[in-house]
Image (cartoon, coloured by chain):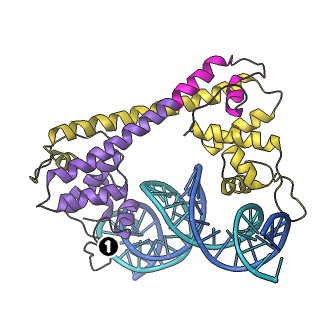
Chain colours: A purple, B yellow, C blue, D cyan
DNA sequence: GCTTGACCTTCCAATTATAGGAAGGTGCAG
DNA sequence: CTGCACCTTCCTATAATTGGAAGGTCAAGC
């Protein structure tokens, strides 16, 4: 199977597949005589794994760890559990941060008429002269 | 005022101030005879504005637009309102995406014992063989 | 047999926002 | 005068992805 087919069936673009190979996330696989990369079902399955993990927001480094665990038939489910739990926690933190931003923005929006006049509490709020604004 | 003082009082690092100048977000300000950048209160206020907007997750391009509105004494609050509303919407979308990720992850975590055995529904879920996983 | 088009290859660069360091100039205090 | 803290510019890196250029390969059609 050529890289294009592998890309289409896995949902990972050919560009990304080459990139993942270059950074060592996936192995330097087999080549045909013409130099073309050659893939089989196992490779596609691995690519789908990566795709799913990316969709869940795992970083490539986290995925690297997950792949190691995946390839290791003797791993414990605890290791995977720990990694996933940590990632979930990161996501939850990010959600909380975004919610704080949204809250402040909604406040500012509520105080701004949105008409033709130049007065705007949003800009004042950002300037730090009127409203206190959340800090990271 | 030197760049270091401006950085400390505005919360924007000296590195970033120079960068914002280089990309044209802020003006190429005055220089002293020795070549050092020189800042006044107005500059610091602008930097604080940028800092607050970054804290609220605005991109530099969005901040560029906000700054234009801020500097324009004749602007309408509607323009600012529209920009902020659009940004709030983006944030809300991102929150929803992250919540979907968190939901799926929590599901997978709940199904995984987290013990010494190698069976782990998390990996199966990512591999796409057992559980359906959210897609972006 | 040659052209066309769809593949594939590598390499190089851009994106976004921030940070780190190197190499060198400036200014002040001891 | 030395030391130290500050400033300058320029180069590099990060993370993940995308884009393009320049070129090789393969099968179909005329």
Give the percent coordinates (x, y) of residue A38: 26, 69
Give the percent coordinates (x, y) of residue A31: 27, 75
Give the percent coordinates (x, y) of residue D7: 77, 62
Residue A70 is drawn in which quadrant?
A: bottom left
Residue B105 magenta-drawn? no
Q: Is residue B105 visible?
A: yes
Helix, strand or loop for disc 1: loop
Quarter of the image that includes the C terminus of chain B:
top left
User: Looking at the image, which residue sits at the far right?
Assistant: B33
**Identity of the residue drawn at 32% across and 55% down:** A62
Viewer-side residue, B83 vs D15: D15
**Identity of the residue drawn at 10% across and 54% down:** B118
Q: Tell me if residue B119 comes above or below residue B41 in the rendering.
A: below
Circle 1 residue: A36
**Left or right side of B56 for A48:** left
Q: Tell me if residue B129 comes above or below residue C21 in the rendering.
A: above
Badge 1 density bin: few <14, some 14–19, many ≥20, Cα 10 Å: few
**Left or right side of D19 for A11:** left
Residue A55 is drawn in which quadrant?
A: top left
Task: Please state the extent of the stretch shown in magenta in the rendering.
Answer: A101-127
**Chain letter for mark 1:** A
Viewer-side residue, C16 vs B32: B32
Residue B80 is drawn in which quadrant?
A: top right
Residue A111 magenta-drawn? yes
**Identity of the residue drawn at 27% across and 40% down:** B105
Number of numbered tags placed on the structure image: 1
Viewer-side residue, A13 vs A49: A49
Give the percent coordinates (x, y) of residue C25: 82, 74
The prevailing secondary structure element of the residues shown in magenta is helix
**Identity of the residue drawn at 66% across and 48% down:** B12
């Amino acid at each position: 199977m050529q890289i294009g087919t592998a890309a289409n069936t896995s949902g990972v673009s050919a560009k990304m597949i080459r990139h993942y190979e270059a950074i060592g996330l996936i192995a330097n696989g087999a080549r045909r005589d013409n130099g073309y990369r050659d893939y089989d079902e196992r490779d596609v399955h691995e690519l789908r794994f990566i795709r799913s993990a990316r969709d869940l927001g795992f970083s490539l480094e986290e995925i690297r760890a997950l792949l190691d665990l995946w390839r290791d038939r003797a791993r414990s489910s605890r290791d995977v559990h720990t990694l996933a739990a940590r990632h979930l926690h990161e996501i939850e933190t990010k959600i909380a941060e975004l919610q704080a931003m949204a809250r402040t923005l909604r406040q500012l929006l509520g105080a701004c008429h949105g008409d033709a006049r130049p007065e705007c509490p949003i800009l004042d709020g950002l300037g730090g002269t009127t409203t206190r604004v959340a800090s990271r």
